[in-house]
Every structure is written in C-alpha cells, then in structure tokens.
Image (cartoon, grey):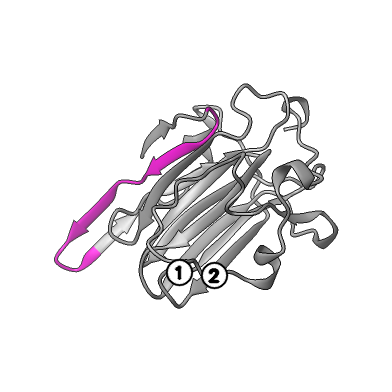
Amino acid sequence: MKITELEVPGVFLLEPKYFEDSRGYYCESYSKRTLAEIGLNADFVQDGHSLSREKGILRGIHFQRYPHSQTKLVRCTRGRILDVAVDLRKGSKYYTRWVAVELSEENRRQLWIPKGFGHAFLTLSENCELQYKVDDFYCPREDRSIAWSDPQIAVDWHLTAEPTLSEKDKKAPLLKDSDVNFATENC
C-alpha cells in the first residue's frame, strides 16, 4: 500500500495495491498493522455506507465534537467524488486549512482523516457510493456541521452550479458561529 501524507499534516492518501488477472482482482483495502507501522492508529468500531444518486450533491462539512470526535477512513466504491478534510483544531498552525482529493472506483484511493477535522464531499458523477470506517460511534448530541461555503475556510469546490444540500447542511452555521471544541491537545 502506498501511503502519502498530504499538505495538511495528519491527512493521508492511501493507495492499496491491486492484484488483477482475467478473473478480476484482489486487494487488501485495510491493514491495521500496515498503518500502525507509520503511526496511524485507530480502533475502528463502525463502518458506514452511503449512496448519493445525483451529480452535484454536497455533504458536509461534518464532524463530531470532542470527546466523540472520529478518525475516518473514506473510500468511493462507485462513481467519483471530491473528498475534503478541514483542520478544525484551534491552536493548530493549519487551522481552517483543507485538502481535497478525488476518490473514485477507478483510482481506488482512500482518505485518512484524523480526529479534529471536518469532512465533506461533492459528487462528481451519479450514483456515488462511499464506504467509511470510524473509530467512535455516531453520537447525535455531538454531531455538527459547518457551512460548506464558509469564507473563512474557502474550499474551492470547482462548482459549475449550485450544489444539492440536505436541510441540515443548508442550516449549518459558519465556523465563527459554531461550537467546535477541538484543540491540538485533545485530538
């Protein structure tokens, strides 16, 4: 597996090795041991699977507040998405910085998003399926969103039209008005 740390430290791009022949392929999509060898440790407790039927659906920027913050390992198993991780750790020299990578069924990449980061994605095709692992259970009382268009974060979504949003994401506050409680020492 090729593992590359991205521009915002702590966020990693994982590219599993695929072994293909005329019958199909095999890959090891996750290895706790391989990741632990480079210091990426997470005790994943829950897997999620989502479907977005249309191109132009934007979900996020989502996170769970401390002490239920989550490390995520995200992959797109059908379609194409622009996957975004935003540093929300107050005191981090990378606070509000973001990274974006395309994940798709063709490129088979995965994105490691550590605790203290927000997560969002934009569908670039129809019928996008995401599968992701998290290291803490869903906690409704700590579930939060930040506006996808927050000017303090200023993600470049490369939009050509207004995205389709959930009601929750339409009502998400700006970062300055949110109750984000991440700090570098608790993530």
User: Residue 70: x, y in percent?
Assistant: 68, 47
Give me the residue at 58% from left, 40% from top. 153
Q: Label for residue 129?
A: 1
Inspect the magenta stretch and tell me whether residue 32 lies in it.
Answer: no
> Are the two marked residues, 2 and 1, in contact with CB atoms closer than 8 angstroms?
yes
Residue shown at 37% from the left, 64% from the top: 124
**Span highlighted in magenta in the image:** 9-24
- Point out which mark residue 50 bears: 2
Classify 10 Å Cα crowding around label 1: few (below 14), some (14-19), many (20 and above). many
Relative to 68, 123 lies left or right: left
Whether 184 is drawn above or below 14: the answer is above
Number of residues whose C-alpha sits closer than 10 Å to that of mark 2, classed few (under 14), some (14–19) or many (20 or more): few
**What amino acid does circle 2 point to?**
Ser
Q: Quadrant of the C terminus?
A: top right
Instruction: Give the image location of residue 8, x and y in percent.
Output: 51, 30
Q: Secondary structure at mark 1?
A: strand
Picture quarter containing residue 88? top right
Quadrant occupied by the N terminus: top left
Secondary structure of the residue carrying tag 2 is strand
Which residue is at 68% across, 38% downward? Answer: 116
Residue 82 in percent (x, y) is at 42, 54
State whether residue 181 is above or below residue 19.
above
Q: Spatial distance from mark 2 to mark 1, Cα to Cα?
A: 6 Å
Q: Amino acid at mark 1?
A: Glu
In the displayed orientation, state which residue is furthest to the left. 22
